[in-house]
Image (cartoon, rainbow, N blue to C red):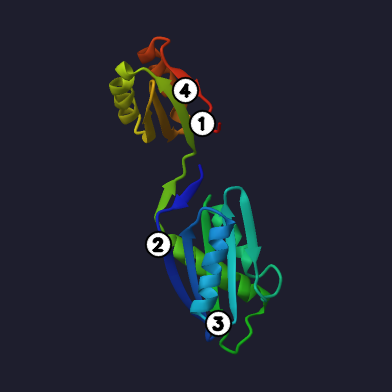
């Protein structure tokens, strides 16, 4: 079962005088992640490394930002994968303290920085959403609104013209039951349209 995060959570470690500032946070996609990483670089101009890992919308990334290959981004990504986190960005800002940690030490430090943040993070079950577009007579609008409410769905937009056009969002797993109840309510008088048209 995939999860996402409720909000950004931070951690901080000091290992052999190096400071590791970790953060895990929800993101929509790679573009949003890149903006956050740019912001961290601006916020921490004296930092030696801003390493990051991304799991979002089928996209993943592991960036070592100058650390030896595979010692920062990949271990951070492994933490996200192990905890089944999707739609999230893990970042660690490192201020080098003058003592080299070695490859194993770096892997542990970056893993621990993200793992500690994850201990404090509120995980939310990630649910896939679906959109439905339905055309129905005015007489059925009240019933449609009750069904939308009962399904904890969201009415994105309702357009009133010759008839009512309802744009509805709900959890994908609930679509078959919802459509069945709506069809029963409409008794052949409502039409399902493709919401991508």
Q: Quadrant of the C terminus?
A: top right
Q: Earlier in the sequence, mark 3 or mark 2?
A: 3
Q: Residues within 10 Å of mark 2 (few under 14, many from 20)?
A: few
Q: Is residue 98 above or below residue 77?
A: below
Q: Earlier in the sequence, mark 3 or mark 4?
A: 3
Determine which of the numbered discs, if any, sits on residue 176 in the image.
Answer: 4
* 2 vs 1, front mark: 1
Q: Badges 2 and 4: C-beta atoms under 8 Å apart?
A: no
Determine which of the numbered discs, if any, sits on residue 195 in the image.
Answer: 1
Q: Earlier in the sequence, mark 3 or mark 1?
A: 3
Q: Position of residue 45 (x, y in %)?
A: 54, 83
Distance in Å between CA atoms under marks 2 and 1:
39 Å
Q: Residues within 10 Å of mark 1 (few under 14, many from 20)?
A: few
Q: Badges 3 and 1: C-beta atoms under 8 Å apart?
A: no
Q: Badges 3 and 2: C-beta atoms under 8 Å apart?
A: no
Distance in Å between CA atoms under marks 3 and 2:
24 Å
Q: Is residue 60 above or below residue 11?
A: above
Distance in Å between CA atoms under marks 3 and 1:
47 Å
Indicate the secondary structure of the residue bearing disc 1: loop
Q: Position of residue 52 (x, y in %)?
A: 58, 66
């Amino acid at each position: 079962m995939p999860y996402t995060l409720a909000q950004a959570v931070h951690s901080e470690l000091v290992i052999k005088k190096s400071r590791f500032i970790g953060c895990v946070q929800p993101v929509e996609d790679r573009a949003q992640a890149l903006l956050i990483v740019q912001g961290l670089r601006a916020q921490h101009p004296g930092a030696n490394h801003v390493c990051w890992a991304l799991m979002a919308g089928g996209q993943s990334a592991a960036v070592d930002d100058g650390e030896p290959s595979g010692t920062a981004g990949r271990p951070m990504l492994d933490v996200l994968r192990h905890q089944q986190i999707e739609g999230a960005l893990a970042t660690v800002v490192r201020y080098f303290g003058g003592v080299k940690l070695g490859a194993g030490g770096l892997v542990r430090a970056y893993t621990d920085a993200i793992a500690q943040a994850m201990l404090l993070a509120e995980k939310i079950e990630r649910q896939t959403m679906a959109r439905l577009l339905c055309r129905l007579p005015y007489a059925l609008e009240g019933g449609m609104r009750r069904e939308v409410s009962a399904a904890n769905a969201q009415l994105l937009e309702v357009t009133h013209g010759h008839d009512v056009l309802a744009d509805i969002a709900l959890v994908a797993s609930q679509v078959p039951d919802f459509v069945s109840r709506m069809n029963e309510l409409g008794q052949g008088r409502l039409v399902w349209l493709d919401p991508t048209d």
